[in-house]
Amino acid sequence: MLQREFALFGGEFLLTLGAKDLRAWFAAFFAVDEDVWGGFLGGWPGLPGNQHHETRIGRLMFGLALLPRLPPSVALKLAAFVADYSLNHGLGLLRSLAPVFGDGEYFEVDEHQRPPVGDLVLKAEIRERVAARH
């Protein structure tokens, strides 16, 4: 769930970028070691490179490796978005990076009461958000 929180944040951030900044983001993203960015895109336990993202320290190191590769204007937008996202969506992103923010209530919920997650749910959520912006 923490790895998913991190990925959702990234997707939300990318939706805020214009074409020029998006190109700069992906240039920086693909400048990180291939095993690291490949593991992020795979995003599933057991897939090659996922060990770089399945722990808090791994996700933090990924972010720290990416940050200096970003143009300053994109890095500034990222920093502002981290603050805005955390204020408006809670501590999910921060929990995904540091244990001091806790694990989140979804770790306390009985497995059978937990809402479904996965590609279908995520795709439906993305469709709703895109439709709401138009």
Image (cartoon, rainbow, N blue to C red):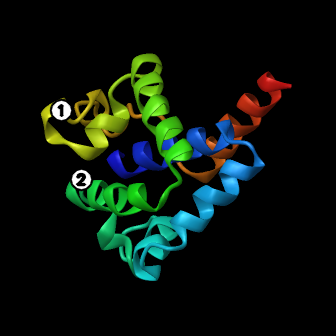
Let me know if residue 87 appears in the view. Answer: yes
Give the residue type that dot 2 points to.
Arg
Q: Can residue 116 be spotted in the picture?
A: no
Furthest-front residue in view?
A: 72
Q: Looking at the image, which residue sits at the far left?
A: 100
Q: Position of residue 1 (x, y in %)?
A: 36, 46
Q: In terms of sequence position, does the residue under pointer 2 or pointer 1 come before the other?
A: 2
| Residue 32 sits above or below residue 100 on the image | below
Q: Residue at x 48, y 38 (%)?
A: 76
The residue positioned 22% from the left and 36% from the top of the image is 103
Which quarter of the image is occupied by the C terminus? Answer: top right
Residue 102, label in figure: 1
Q: Tell me the quarter of the picture where residue 126 sits.
A: top right
Q: Where is residue 38 shown, x and y percent of the image?
A: 49, 75
Q: CA distance from mark 2 to mark 1?
A: 12 Å
Q: Residue furthest right?
A: 134
Q: Could you tell whether 84 is left or right of 130 in the image?
A: left
Task: Say which residue label 2 marks.
Answer: 56
Q: Position of residue 71 (x, y in %)?
A: 53, 53
Front residue of 81/94: it is 81
Q: Residue at x 55, y 72 (%)?
A: 30
Foreground of the two, 12 or 66: 66
